[in-house]
């Protein structure tokens, strides 16, 4: 599913584009109002800047409010797109992140190595793809699959133990 597959991203993108079109329209109307005020005899001995500001004051306020709204929509769009983007998972990246966590103690509090490490399901899917592609035989497939299932059980036990000790030392 692509980035535009998410209805929230679509709605935010449509709102942002509509807001930008509205910004251009407001700017054009404000400029037209300011230029048309030049021919008004009421402003005969008034400085030019005051004429422009008086004629376009409503458009300036509308422009600023719409610009603020467009900015908020853009921030929402970026946040929604980033949340929708998938995090790459592989062993090499997990190793690099673990090394960075060892070097920088503050990085370990984020828990990124666990987020980028492939899950057992990811590894099983990759193993199935290798088997279907004919890269490995049936015996090798069964052996690796059994090892993955056994590792999954032990990984779950390790996670439970880690959570238990974290709760004990929390207080």
Image (cartoon, helix red, strand yellow):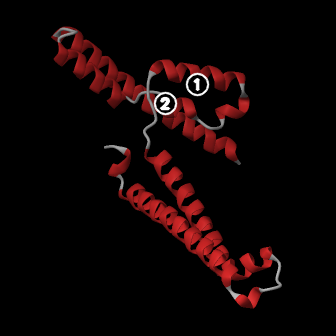
Is residue 69 placed above or below 165 in the rendered structure?
Answer: below
Give the answer, above or below, for where 121 lies relative to 10.
above
Q: Position of residue 34 (x, y in %)?
A: 66, 76
> In the visual, does 45 lie left or right of 69?
right
Residue 157 image offset from top left, x and y in percent: 45, 32
**From the viewer's perspective, is residue 51 above or below residue 85?**
below
Q: Secondary structure at mark 1?
A: helix
Residue drawn at point x = 66 percent, y = 37 percent: 109
Q: Residue at x 47, y 27 (%)?
A: 117
Q: In terms of depth relative to the viewer, which is nearer, 150 or 78?
A: 78
Circle 1 Cα neighbour tier, 10 Å, few/some/many (<14 / 14–19 / ≥20): many
Query: Left or right: 104 with respect to 117?
Result: right
Please report the residue visible at 75 percent of the width from the left and 80 percent of the height from the top: 51
Asked where in the image residue 46 lies, by quadrant, the reply is bottom right
Q: Position of residue 72 (x, y in %)?
A: 58, 62
Q: Which residue is mark 2?
A: 116
Q: Which residue is mark 1?
A: 97
Answer yes or no: do the residues labelled 1 and 2 have beta carbons within 8 Å?
Answer: yes
């Amino acid at each position: 599913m692509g980035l535009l597959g998410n209805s929230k991203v679509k709605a935010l993108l449509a709102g942002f584009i509509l807001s930008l079109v509205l910004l251009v329209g407001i700017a054009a109307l404000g400029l037209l109002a300011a230029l048309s005020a030049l021919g008004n005899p009421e402003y005969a001995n008034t400085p030019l800047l005051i004429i422009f500001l008086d004629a376009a004051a409503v458009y300036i306020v509308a422009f600023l409010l719409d610009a603020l709204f467009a900015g908020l929509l853009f921030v929402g769009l970026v946040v929604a797109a980033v949340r929708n983007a998938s995090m790459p998972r592989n062993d090499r990246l997990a190793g690099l992140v673990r090394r960075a966590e060892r070097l920088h103690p503050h990085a370990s509090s984020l828990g990124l190595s666990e987020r980028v490490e492939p899950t057992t399901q990811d590894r099983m899917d990759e193993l199935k793809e290798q088997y279907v592609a004919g890269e490995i035989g049936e015996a090798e497939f069964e052996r690796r699959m059994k090892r993955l299932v056994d590792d999954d059980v032990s990984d779950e036990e390790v996670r439970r133990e880690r959570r238990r000790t974290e709760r004990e030392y929390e207080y």
